[in-house]
Amino acid sequence: MDHTPRTRLSPDARRQQILHAASKLYSERRYDDVSLEELAAAAGVARGLLHHYFGSKRELFLAVMTASVRLPLEQLPDLDGRPIPERAKLTMSWILEGAQSYGQGWVNASGAEQWNPDNDVQALVDAADDRAARFMLDALGLPDDAGLRPRLRPVAAFTKALCREWLQRKTLTRDEVLELSTAAVLRAVRVS
Amino acid sequence: MDHTPRTRLSPDARRQQILHAASKLYSERRYDDVSLEELAAAAGVARGLLHHYFGSKRELFLAVMTASVRLPLEQLPDLDGRPIPERAKLTMSWILEGAQSYGQGWVNASGAEQWNPDNDVQALVDAADDRAARFMLDALGLPDDAGLRPRLRPVAAFTKALCREWLQRKTLTRDEVLELSTAAVLRAVRVS
DNA sequence: CCCACTATTGACAGTTTGCCAATAGCCGAT
DNA sequence: ATCGGCTATTGGCAAACTGTCAATAGTGGG
């Protein structure tokens, strides 16, 4: 046995290290195909530590997913005074930018593995889609009432599917994706 | 031990029986949360028989999924001579009908559990979406070349997300779903 | 410099999957 | 009707995996 002297880190640092290693493994193989032993080896720690920090294998996985299914949509280009169609197009263009550079996880995580209605992963994806819908409403300067959010949420699924065609299969161009997704947004908010 | 005398069925009948039982269990709980022992008990057979028929747990699961992620889209209403927008609306209405009555699985299975690009479930869903796109092209009387299929495939994801809002969350009406999905189809095939 | 705190480890028990030899229904042949 | 062979079906074994917990060893504070 190789007895690497045990190194002691702050809980936060260790957590990040484990999440980072797990993120890489889960991006390559399925959840049930990756053992805790592998995850521990990749992170360079003992298997028991994973349970110590995350409780169970599922919770570790969900922690990884939570960080991956959402696009980083912090700052918003300044859109004051422009008409809504232009706002929609610019915001969607902004989103596509994010999808291209950071959003590998966002693009692919488009739903649950099975059709179980109360699925933990589906809940994460739904929350992310809802967040994207609110983001868009905010960018358009529209109120969050009036039932627009349910009409806008499915557009997130649409956009992700379009991005898969564009970024992975390379069957669509960026311009096509932008056009189709923007049109869906405008139709959803009832603006021609 | 209860020794129910062992009953011998034809391979096809047994396969169907197992698939039926598995389908029910998988609709309630996650893949990794259902053990082969439970599946065997639900089907009323020994655990070894599942391996005999399906090889592995994963293959049994995929067999269930294969049947569930596709809508039964056999017959198509007769649309000869009508303009394309009307064809699109009628076809989409037909699809929504199927989603409401049979398509619990189709609506929910909208993607992979994780963002692994070569995921077996994702492949099934992709094939189903592609099939739906061909179905729609056929209904519209449009040729399958010209790169329309990649533009139309994401509409399947969009429609499923809309159906989830309509059938599960009850935040949209059937008419709204019909309007938004039909508009997406028409935009995808470049017909106003 | 030593002690207490806690991050980290290794081992154990229960469960699960995959595999294979043994068993027993069923159909055709005699 | 009965027997024999084919194969559907079973039960048990070995390896792998997850969850739990007591023991261990860095590390900062007194």
Image: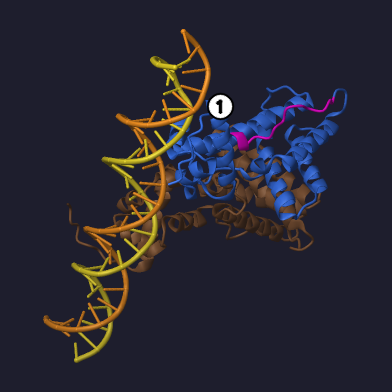
Chain colours: A blue, B brown, C yellow, D orange
Residue shown at 67%/37% (left/top)?
B176
- Please name whichever residue, A12 or A165, is drawn nearer the observer in this view of the structure: A12
Task: Tell me the crowding category of disc 1: few under 14, some 14 to 19, or many 20 or more residues within 10 angstroms, Cα based.
Answer: few
Chain where mark 1 sits = A
The magenta-colored residue range is A67-79
Which x, y percent locates residue A46? 45, 39
Task: Give residue A83's quadrant in the image.
Answer: top right
* Residue, disc 1: A12
- Please name whichever residue, A31 or B86, is drawn nearer the observer in this view of the structure: A31
Task: Examine the rendered structure and indicate whether residue A27 appears above or below residue B82.
Answer: above
Which x, y percent locates residue A56? 44, 36
Which x, y percent locates residue A188? 73, 35
Task: Examine the rendered structure and indicate whether residue A18 appears above or below residue B16.
Answer: above
Task: Give residue A132's quadrant in the image.
Answer: top right
Is residue A73 part of the magenta span, yes or no? yes
Task: Examine the rendered structure and indicate whether residue A127 appears above or below residue B151.
Answer: above
Is residue A134 part of the magenta span, yes or no? no
Quick one: SS at disc 1? Answer: helix
Whether residue A168 is visible, yes or no, is yes
